[in-house]
Amino acid sequence: MPIFNTYDGTALAYHVRGEGEPLVCLPGGAMRASTYLGDLGGLTAGRRLILLDLRGTGDSAVPADESTYRVDHQVADVEALRVHLGLERMDVLAHSAGGNLAQLYAAAHPDRLRRLVLVTPTCWAVDLDATPEQRLEAVRVRAGSEPYDTAIAAYERILTAAGTPTPADWREVMPLAYGRWDEAARAHLAASDGEKNPVAAAAYAGPGAFDPPATRAGLRGVTGEVLVLAGELDSNPTPALAADLAGLFLQGIVDVQAAGAHFPWLDDPQRFATRVEAFLATGA
C-alpha cells in the first residue's frame, strides 16, 4: 500500500490494482474508503487502478486540521497525487460525491487531465440538482414489488416531508441505489457504515466549498474528453441531469447504462468496464 505526504503533511494512502495505463480513481460516499469501488467491474483487466483513500478515510491519516475535509481543500491532494505518480497528464475516474472533487480539480487544473470519467456524479460544484419531483419520477418506475414499494415510500418521506428524515428512512431507501437488490448489493451496502468517516462527510460540502460560476467557467477550459456515465434507474443524478453536466464541458458526452442505478459497475460489470475502457482508449 503506497503512501505519500500531501501539501499539509497528511499521509495519504492509495491502492494499486491491475496492470496497464494508470487510472486515478476518486471515491464518493461522501468520504468513503476506496475499497467499495472494488475492481470497477473488471477495469483491472486493462488498467492500473490508483484508488485514493481521501484524507481521514481507509488507510489515509486523519488531518491535523479537520476543516480540510471540505472538498475544495482536497483538490490539492489530487494534484499532490499526480505529482507523486510522476504523471504529466492523467486519466481520472470519480464516483458520486467524488464527482464534485473531480469537477473542482478539472476547473483548477484543466491542463493536467487527459480524459475524465464521471460515474453517477452529484453536481453540487456546478449547482445542478434534480427537483424532488424529478427524482421521484425516476424511482417510481420500479413500483409494484418489494423492496421497491417500501423504498419509494421512504424516499417520498425524505424528499417531501417537513421534518428530518430518520435513519430508518435512509436505510429503507437504499435498494433504489442498486440495479438489482441481490446478495452482492446487500453485502456492498452492509459494508458502507464501516467504510465512511461521518465527521469528514459532514464537512465535505460545507459552507464555502463551492463557487459554481467560477467552476463552470473553469470547466470550459478542459480540452480533454469527458464521459458522464449515468444509470437509467438512478435518481441522483438522473440521466437528464447527467446530460446537463456533460454539456458544461467542451467535449462532454453522456452515456446511460440500461438497468443501472448508482453503482453501475455492480449492476452490469461487463457493460460498465467495456464502455469505460473504450472511452479511455479511444475517446468518444
Image: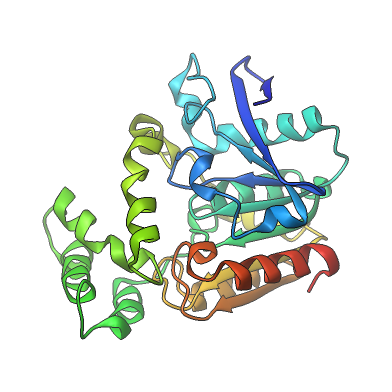
Q: Is residue 214 visible?
A: no
User: Split into 4 quadrants, where in the image is the N terminus?
Assistant: top right
Q: Is residue 11 visible?
A: yes
Residue at the farthest left position? 163
User: Split into 4 quadrants, where in the image is the C terminus?
Assistant: bottom right
- At horizontal 31% and vertical 47% (from top left) the residue drawn is 190
- Residue 268, given in percent of the width and then of the height, sits at 53, 71
**Nearer-the-camera pick, 89 or 271:** 271
Splitting the image into 4 quarters, where does residue 243 fall?
bottom right
Location of residue 161 with respect to 30 vertically, above or below: below
- At horizontal 57% and vertical 61% (from top left) the residue drawn is 119
In the rendered structure, the answer to whether residue 282 lies left or right of residue 94 reads right
Splitting the image into 4 quarters, where does residue 280 fall?
bottom right
**Nearer-the-camera pick, 219 or 116:** 116
Location of residue 125 with respect to 161 vertically, above or below: above
- Residue 253, given in percent of the width and then of the height, sits at 69, 74
Residue at the farthest right position? 88
- At horizontal 16% and vertical 71% (from top left) the residue drawn is 150
**Nearer-the-camera pick, 56 or 41:** 41
- At horizontal 34% and vertical 34% (from top left) the residue drawn is 198
In the rendered structure, the answer to whether residue 227 lies left or right of residue 195 reads right
What colour scheme was applied to this rendering of the protein? Answer: rainbow
Residue at the farthest front position? 183
- Residue 163, given in percent of the width and then of the height, sits at 11, 55
In the rendered structure, the answer to whether residue 189 lies left or right of residue 69 reads left
Report the label total. 0
